[in-house]
Image (cartoon, helix red, strand yellow):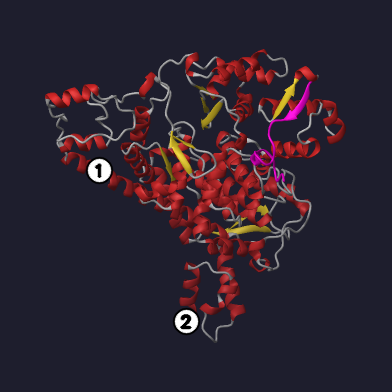
Amino acid sequence: MNKDTLLQYFDRHYIPRRDMLPRIPLGTNPDEFWKEIESRRRAKSTTLPIHGPAGSPYWFVTTDRMVSASETIVEELMASDESVFHGPPILAPLEEVFYTSYVEGSPMTMQAAMEFLQSGEEPRDVEEQMIVNNRSALSFAASNLYHPVDEELIRMLTLILTQNMDGGGQDYRTSDWTEIPSMMGEPYELPTALSVPDRMKELTAYLADPLVHPLMKAAVAHAWILAARPFPEGNERLARLLSTVILVRFGYTFLGEISLSELVAKNGYPYYNAIANILRKENGGDLTYFLEYYLLLLAQAVDERRQRKLNAEAENLSMGLEMARTPLIAPTVPERSHSEQNAAEQSPPKRSGQKAKASNDPVADSLAAEGFVSLLDEGASEGEIQPPEGGDNRWSGERKAREALYTVISGQGTSLPEFAKALVRWLDAGQYTFTVKDIRAMADLDATKVNKVIFQLREKGIIETIGKTDAYALYTFCCGELSDSDYSTEMIRSLNDLVNGSQSMKDKRIGTMLLSHLNRGHITLQDYEEAGDESRWAEDMKLAEQMGFVRRIAKDRCLILGDAQPCFEMLDTGQKRRAKLMYETFGDETFSLEMVVATLDYSSSTASAYLHQFTLLRILDCRKEDVNLYQFLVNPREHPEVFEDAA
């Protein structure tokens, strides 16, 4: 094997020195051969205006593989209508919220992460905090896509990514060394802490250069964050998010729909090896090892996206051909005998959700099974679904549920429509509640896809969680005008008490907003926005849900319940901790505000607020006739869910 053949091989394969030795034959001097390889690379390299640990600039070589990868990405940009902004582009899918933590070693599973996000609870540990921070940072980045990618934006993203975490914040690191677990004990050198602000200015100036290709901006930004580690915490998550922001800003919106962290998680070794190669001092600030890996990863993402689109188009074509084979004839209902007619007239009407009775017409039965024709009550007009007995129009939601599901079925993708079809079959069987196990068996989807689809349907307001289990229910939309008679007397009285009380403006606001929307049966974030109180929506609805007035069925919508029953399961960790502390101090005896202030080291205003909230939640009874003495209505034995680790 002659030298020219070897050199051509190493031109095609950008390999670091430590990986060179197995690829050269005996008799070739490794040191001399490596000097020649390095000389050839330096001759065609690009020097970056960003300096590394020793003060020398970083550099890279534009390899053939990088060019090929860029062609794949650019072709997709040119072929896709999504390269033109039609409203706000998507910035990373739901999977990125989970996988960007998973890549860094978080032990949290996808199912646990999705259940936590659906619960709306406060984070209980660092893994849950990271999930919340990831989602908040993605949301912030999506809302600020047109903000210059400058030092301010980078530091703000870091602040959000590391909120409430050890070492979190937007300040640069103050140590010259930070632990990088993926280096597995290998020595490495970082830019000094004192130099980080200047190096960050160099990076942002490079990103602002209009002559630099956007793909290189994204790749270099990603590589530099990993090589310089400018912050004490969150650098790798920041690198992935920042590079995606840059790509989407320059029109590669289709890459914003892909979770790069998920691709990394499926094959992590090349990612960590690329990071190690740009950190190793022996490689002299050569970023090519990571830049080539990153661009190939983007090209892989494009290829996978194309394949998913082809699969979806093939499935839609197959469904279309199947529908084309089905004759479009009107379903018929066979005539009934005189005795059958009399029996039907004497029978009570069937409730919504009762299983349809089969006709003698297979086409009609097929259409009914797919929800296009209702055979629930042969006396109804075609397509009508009868409300429940007793004239209660409040929960006549089967038609709405079917309409929402068929909108999903006719949409894009495979998993979501398949899941919706399974729910339609579930409705046909007269069922409104289901578990993950039920639908997995019907839809033949794996656990990851089921959890993703459940989250999407819940966000769309089609299903709702039942308690804290894996059980769910189809959300039955309110229809028609409601009246006070649709709500319990206790519910109306409690809301009026909130409005007329003098304790809190928050109480008045919650009571007023809910009373003004009783006739509609639900309340939305838009209602709060119209009242100029959108910033208070989340906290108000959290308390209203704890008091049992509402149930959240989407992030911007709550159903107003017919009866008010406190929902102790909705209490957060802080409330449970305070309830435990108070009960351990006072037990079942009566106590006053002054006693709480004196024994628990709360200020008077803080103690008053806690006592008032517990009274609203019916955890405490406020005996006003006894000069505002309080007493617990619950105890750890009968209501352990109220107390955190209470005996």
Q: Which residue is mark 2?
A: 2
The x, y position of residue 642, in whole percent, is 67, 38
Q: Nearer the viewer, residue 463 or 3?
A: 463
645 in the magenta segment: yes
Q: Is residue 599 above or below residue 453?
A: above
Q: Is residue 433 left or right of residue 622?
A: left
Q: Are marks 2 and 1 in contact (CB under 8 Å)?
A: no
Q: Residue at x 67, y 21 (%)?
A: 506
Q: Is residue 506 left or right of residue 216?
A: right
Residue 353: quadrant of the picture? top left
The x, y position of residue 487, in whole percent, is 51, 19
Secondary element at image label 1: helix
Secondary element at image label 2: loop
The x, y position of residue 258, in whole percent, is 47, 47
Q: Is residue 345 left or right of residue 456?
A: left
Q: Nearer the viewer, residue 587 or 551?
A: 587
What is the number of the mark on residue 432? Answer: none
Mark earlier in primary sequence (2, 1): 2
Q: Nearer the viewer, residue 16 or 27?
A: 16
Q: Residue at x 83, y 32 (%)?
A: 602
